[in-house]
Image (spheres, rainbow, N blue to C red):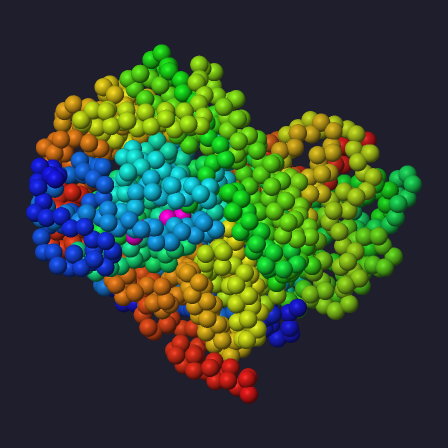
Amino acid sequence: MRREIIDRLERALGAAAVTTDDTELLVYECDALALFKNKPDAVVFPANTEQVAEVVRIANEYRIPFLPRGSGTGLSGGAMAIDGGIIIELQGMNRILSVDVDNRFAVVQPGVVNIHISQAVAPHGLYYAPDPSSQSACSIGGNVAENAGGPHCLKYGMTTNHILAIEAVLSSGEVVRLGNPAGEAVGMDLLGAIVGSEGTFAIVTEITVRLLPKPQAVKTLLAAYKSFEECSQTVSDIVAAGIVPAALEFMDDNTIVAVEASVYRAGFPLDARAVLLIEVDGFSDGLTETAAEIIEICRRNNAYDVRVAKDEEERARLWMGRKGSFGAMGRISPDMMVMDAVIPRTQLPGVLAGIERISERYRLKVANVFHAGDGNLHPLILFDSRHQDQVDKILIMGEEIMRLCVGVGGSLSGEHGVGCEKNDFMGMVFTESDLESMACVKRVFNSSGLLNPSKVFPTGRGCTEIGRPGTTSTEEIGRKVEKMLLGQKQ
Amino acid sequence: MVKEGTKHPELYLDCVHCGLCLPSCPTYRVLGTEMDSPRGRIYLMRAYDEGRTKITESFVEHMFRCLDCRACETACPSGVHFGEMMESMRAEIVTERSAHWLSRLVLKHVFPYPWRFDLASRALQLYRQSGFQGFVRSTGLLERLAPKVAMAEALMPEAEIESGVALESFHRAEGRKQGTVAFFTGCVMNSMMGSINQASVRLLTAAGYDVVVPGNQICCGALANHAGLRDTAREMAGKNVSAFDAKDLDAIIINAAGCGAMLKEYPVLIGGAEGFASKVQDISEFLASTRIYDRLRIPIERRVGYDDPCHLIHGQGVKAQPRMLLKSIPGIQFVEIEGADQCCGSAGTYNITQNELSMEILDRKMISIRKANIEILATGNPGCMFQFRYGARRAGISLEVVHPVELLARSLD
Amino acid sequence: MTIDGITPGKVLRPESIDELSQALRAESGAVVPLGAATQTCFGNPLHRADCVLDLTGLSRITEYNPADLTIHVEAGVTLGQLQHALRENNQFLPLDPWNGPQATIGGIAAANAQGPFRAAGTIRDWIIGMKVVHVDGRISKTGGRVVKNVTGYDLAKLYTGSLGTLAVVAEISLKLRARFARTATAIVRCENAAAAGRLLSAIRHSPLSPVSCEWVGPENTVWLRFGEHPSAVDWQIRNLPAADWKIIEGADESAEWEKLRRQYHELGSVMLRVIGLPSTVSEIVSEYQPHAWIAHVMNGIVLMSVSTGDEIRAIRSRYRVVVEKAPAEMRREAGTFAPAPAEYELMKKMKEAFDPEGRLNPGRHVDGERRN
């Protein structure tokens, strides 16, 4: 990056808040999707909205791409500087500005960690509902960008249902405020469009979130099964019975082994083929009956062990185990690829069997841990990036799993976003015309096109660098894998 | 396990880059920069191993800015052995870059600030006994610092120097004998905070154990190891292992968390240390399972808080036992401090080498302490105790900082 | 038929999305999409209307998957028709907009129409996908057919509430929920506004979680509706703050809420939606002394009847206000939404991006607002 631009940034933010040091830039070359990486030209650490806007104006002046970043826990490369440019790191803006207990909302800066909101308002009996598995680390700004989900979205809705108002910097550097603390949409819902726009519409610099009163009572159940089918049928039966669980999570045997080998071991049965983690909450009255009804459904579907968490500590442990499960894969595999797809929940048995077939064919293990209640799958492909053939295979394998899910009426992502991971798959679910409408909206918010470019929309070029240096295009990988698979058959 | 030759792929491959460690890291919490997070540091180590970066000045800076508190290990779902990785990386840096960086760091951060010599001089006492001496001399540092250090040393309060437990001594169990333990005196504890060692031995004998204090023990080597002086650390580990006759002991007791974590990890450094390491227990870990409770009879009617030393909670996984012991003192009002499991910023010599950052971390800690409104703070590591005493002075809080064994001993009938 | 005093040149009634697309492709004038015409006086007055697109012909439920709790309907399907279809599987769409069961789903979405059932949000929160036809006849979709989805931008949020000024909503996919095992309503008449305010404050600070919590004035009645597991409903009824509550259930309950719905339509010819906070609802009522009001207390919203444009301006100086209903001239003068400058600019650009010639419902939304 030119000295002149660095000088401008340093003058705007102070020298300590700008880095162009090669070693330091290295750690910003990817987010939690470490498979794709590209180094930014600079990382800046603004302290307030005005500084963010100033960086954006400077970037505009020199026509440099820029993008926001929070904790870098995103799984679709949303915070990866695919075209280089400036990463605007918002970690420094991490204050909870105000809490209105009476009206149940909090005003926070984007760098605040999701769970810190709930911790801060817990003394008032309130909490912030969306709970992505990374909630102990992910930033609320990132949640807004990705419209993050989590297990409890089943009952309480996604991030978009909990964001009441924002302050945001548009790609021109203009600062806008949208929404109101009552959460009442007024006409065209611009705020609703920005939530989930994967950091390509605006940089959100202040967020008003809805707080909910903690439920009077919670019951958490763990049911163990010897087959996927019985597990899936339980999910369907719970839904058919008209029960709205707070969460309904599925973990298979591979996942259980990994979690039980980690610091988050929770006592998941190692002999199960799969377990369901089911939670119901609400008024104490009626909850015991609902839990009993669920236990009955589990037993009817041959759950060989059903237990109810006896106290808050056991409940917390079960959830820590579930939420630590992606990370725990490191216990059983050097690398993993987290997939995210949604299917109509009735398609679970067929799709799980299909994934198993794909896994066998490519000879790479898949662990399944996902939000069964809303059909949001997370197949985790386990591989070793030191073997280039495995790196090559997972991309094709991932695509095959996606096609399987889309084929039954599903979708590419339930909560992780498209980013630069699945943008070339967008054609599987959207037509040119669909994409044109999206592009139309993007042009309004991101008129300069400099904000987080080459994301969401198909680029046809894949990511800048896939896995290790030396790999090139996806087509080439495709050919290689095809050859490999043919070779195996012979 | 770390391979010889300082490459450590098996260790960093455990990291899946999920980022769950970030908020647990004290430097990340203060700085908000990825390169000062556990994930970022691992990423840099991996990049170095893969030849994508060299050991640049900023590389060194970020590696040494780590407190080595291991809070990230407690948060890591993937079980990354961060401490091991960091120590072997530091060892590699020291080998690769000789020692000039340290000289620069100390000169940059200590030299211009006279008040820091107060801290530096205490640390120097550590240097003498911890194997740093030869190393520091080789950098030419001492000559440049010596005059001012001598002055600072002269200013040090006499009262802090207390005699400890004599080496090569034996202390008989009170009442019916339950077993025999050996006591690891630690260098700082015994020379500067000797009363803590005396209290420890009193508690052990009160609990019914014969206590032997082997004579050939030396500094555990933790400071050398954290600073990347691996060979020095290995040598010290070897001497200590042979000083204790582990197989005839019920336990080897240590009351400094940093030393305890180090002793337990000797097998990582040298072969044949498994027997020794398996016997090592922190004093609170050991006492919690003894009959000591019956002897805690003198009430202490004070508001007492406990802060987890990183090398006890994260390094050794000891969290409940010290709390359990303190709570069993009659009359005590035990207060849980918010963020007790987070580092105080002391981290060995960190408060000297990374002073600004250390102070920022300390200031945040003192806010929670003030909130807890306690009269006495107990914590089981000398570095942390120094840091808290300094922190209380700095924040203008009247606070008695003690080792948990001091309170327990006060309650002994 | 006239809308805002304009008689449209022609009315087309397409019976499929393709026909709708063809109609739009063929039309070159101002196009006004219309459902059951239950809320034609909401939004800014139309500037022109060359062609009305009557969407009641798009009345098919295209797919209903009870086990997946999803349904896909054409825009002209009415809310009544939808709820009826869901009933057999003991499911429902948890909405009760004031414009009633005859309103079309497309119309409810276009206006983001709402009623007293507020606990589950508005239709915005239940839409999982949408198919729209653009002014040039192009068809595009957003979202999908699954209950949780972040694939691509959520344009349904933009179309919802944009009053048919960006594109014509043709098909909507909705997620559903199981009907409440039991509902019950508690109504009490308070002595005066201050007493009602105290009671409502007690309710807000209690563990009760009503799905509707309405304060109706000037008679000062408080309406609470509970819907949950039967035991949870019972518990809440038992734990109501002390007052002379009338508890109603079953057919009586529906009839009573239907009465309130009618009352809404009789609040007055000028009605505002004042957006405050739960804690400021009492203050809003006591400060502006409306002739009549219905407040969604848990949401901080007061629907109130006023008389003059000056009153609207006065309230707008303190609160965000949407003009729910008013004579055309007053709506033109005040503007329905009165967006802030930066918001106005964005809305305007959005409108221009989707409808560069300004032919979709011209004047209805941002193009009929004054720039503040």
Viewport quadrant of the N terminus of chain C? top left
Q: Which residue, as the protein is rendered here, is positioned at the far right?
A: B176
- Residue at 34% x, 23% y: name it: C215
User: Residue B370: x percent and y percent?
Assistant: 53, 34
Q: In which quarter of the image is residue B409?
A: top right
Residue at horizontal 54%, vertical 75%?
A: A362
Q: Nearer the viewer, residue A447 or C47?
A: C47
- Above or below: residue C127 compared with residue C372: below
Residue at horizontal 86 percent and vertical 45 percent from the top: B209
Does the stretch in magenta take in A162?
A: no
Give the position of the C terminus of chain C as an image quadrant.
Answer: top left
**Residue stretch in magenta:** C171-175
Name the one closer to the observer, A3 or C167: C167
For the stretch drawn in magenta, what is the main secondary structure? strand
Establish if B317 lies above or below C256. below
Residue B162 seen in the figure: no
In-front residue for pair B108/A386: A386
Residue C104, visible in the rendered structure: yes
Q: Where is residue A216 in the image (x, y as percent from the top left)?
A: 54, 33
